Amino acid sequence: MNDDQNENSYPSTEYLARLRKGAIFYLVGGLILALLRFVAGRIVLALGAGSVICAVGIGWLMANNPNNKKTGALLTGVGVLVMLTGIPHPILKVITATLLSIITIGSLVMGVKHLILYFMAQNRKY
């Protein structure tokens, strides 16, 4: 049998789906964090958005899947960070805004990385 006809030489659909979901999760999350970074200056909006993110994170923490627990911990931490960004203390505001910016950039970079890996995996054989 020719190697081009071997079905095992192509990436699994599970692997492709994982890359695609990761790319969407990180890119959408990064864009939402970028929007929250500009909105978080107002304490009411920061507390509201942060509490919603924390609630989603706590829901994911209660899941049985270890990957969901990691995501839940990340979302809970980001929610707390968004809430702290709204507090009008000058030093705390600078620290939390800087951390939120770093997380936003990291999330967007991870989303682009997963997207590139997804497209490379579709065109590559193992």
Image (cartoon, rainbow, N blue to C red):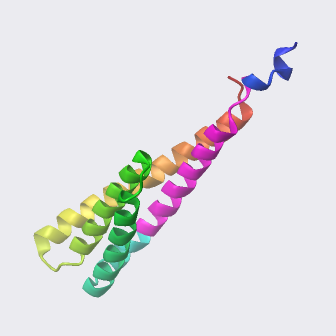
At 31% from the left edge and 76% from the top edge, which residue is drawn? 51
Q: Is residue 76 left or right of residue 8?
A: left
Q: Residue at x 25, y 74 (%)?
A: 83
Image location of residue 24, percent across then percent down = 57, 56
* Image position of 72 (left or right of 41): right
Is residue 113 depicted above or below 40 in this figure?
above
- Who is closer to the viewer here, 51 or 28? 51
Quadrant location, the N terminus: top right
Viewer-nearest residue: 39 or 58: 58
Q: Is residue 31 magenta?
A: yes
Specify the farthest residue to the front: 64
What x and y, as percent, mark residue 105?
Answer: 40, 55
In percent of width and height, residue 106 lies at 39, 51
Q: Quadrant of residue 50?
A: bottom left
Per the rendered image, the range of residues in magenta is 9-33
Q: Residue at x 37, y 52 (%)?
A: 69
